[in-house]
Image (tube, grey):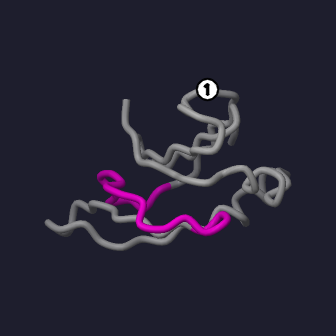
Amino acid sequence: MEERNNMETNESEAVLSSGEGFTAFNFGGYHIRFRAPYSLERYVDVVKWDDGYLVVMAKYSHNAEPEEEYIDLKPILAGLYIDSDAFLKPIKTVRVAYA
């Protein structure tokens, strides 16, 4: 699932968020959504960005404290027929944001 969207604040920063049962990753005019874990309340912080692999802190309904979570974007992009190398190369940082 992808739609064009302009939520980025600069050309090298991507935005991660969640809502309505989905995780959203926004960059380069793309709004990519994929199924989030059922108990995810929200992403709290991005701990590490490594060329498509994210380590994030996530708040789940079953735990009072945020937990470390891992997201690998490469298989998601491949499933959408997006060239992951070209798409991910310009991303230098990822931040969590909510509307």
Residue at image position (68%, 42%) is 1
Residue 80 screen position, x and y as percent = 78, 51
Residue at image position (53%, 31%) is 9
Q: Assess whether residue 43 is covered by the magenta stretch.
A: yes
Label 1: which secondary element:
loop
Q: Decide if residue 7 is on the left or right side of residue 3.
A: left
The residue at which mark 1 appears reads as 6
Residue nearer the viewer, 13 or 30:
13
Identify whether 97 is placed above or below 6.
below
Q: Which residues are magenta?
A: 36-53
Identify whether 35 is placed above or below 1.
below
Q: Decide if residue 48 is on the left or right side of residue 13.
A: left
Residue nearer the viewer, 61 or 85:
85
The image quadrant that residue 11 belongs to is: top right
Residue 53 screen position, x and y as percent = 60, 68
Residue nearer the viewer, 80 or 90:
90
Residue at image position (34%, 65%) is 57
Q: Amino acid at mark 1?
A: Asn
Q: Main secondary structure of the magenta part?
A: strand
